[in-house]
Amino acid sequence: MNPYLKALPLILAGVLLNAFAQIAMKKAVTAVGMEWSLGPLVRLFLQPWMLTCLACYAVSVVLWAAAMNLVTVNFAYPFLALGFVAGALMSRLILGEQVPPLRWLALAIIVVGVGLQAFTAPDHSDSVNKAPAGAEK
């Protein structure tokens, strides 16, 4: 199977986890507040939503590492822009936040841009782990 197709679910799952981590963080700081002293920070980082946030980040890093093993950074990295779309959708659906129409338009443009760059994936004959010309492995 083409490594770029193998990497897509890893990349997209990582983006979604990263976006959900933002929602969890918002819920955590809403629940306990945010103060710059030791006691409140400990309370914040022990709050279940903050633990969920950190777990989502940790899993997304593992997924991203697996994707990096399959594809080039310049292919995968633009997919992180989909986090803006996922964050807006989740903030609307989970937090009830309002998203203005112009922002939806901007997010649609992001989706088009990411979609266009996704079509630039080289065929599977390109080696992702090849050293650049003149470099030793």
Image: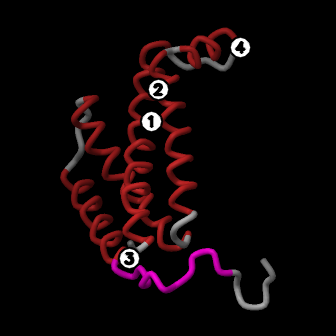
Q: CA distance from mark 4 to mark 3?
A: 45 Å
First in sequence: mark 3 vs mark 2 = 2
In the image: residue 114, left or right of residue 67 = left
Rendering coords of residue 108 (x, y %): 24, 62
Are there few (<14), some (14-19), or many (20+) residues within 10 Å of tag 4? few
First in sequence: mark 4 vs mark 1 = 1
First in sequence: mark 4 vs mark 3 = 4
**77 to 57, vertically: above or below:** below
First in sequence: mark 1 vs mark 2 = 1
Magenta run includes residue 13: no
What's the mark number on residue 38?
4
What's the mark number on residue 100?
none
Identified by mark 3, the residue type is Gln
Helix, strand or loop under label 3: helix
Identified by mark 1, the residue type is Ala
Identified by mark 2, the residue type is Thr
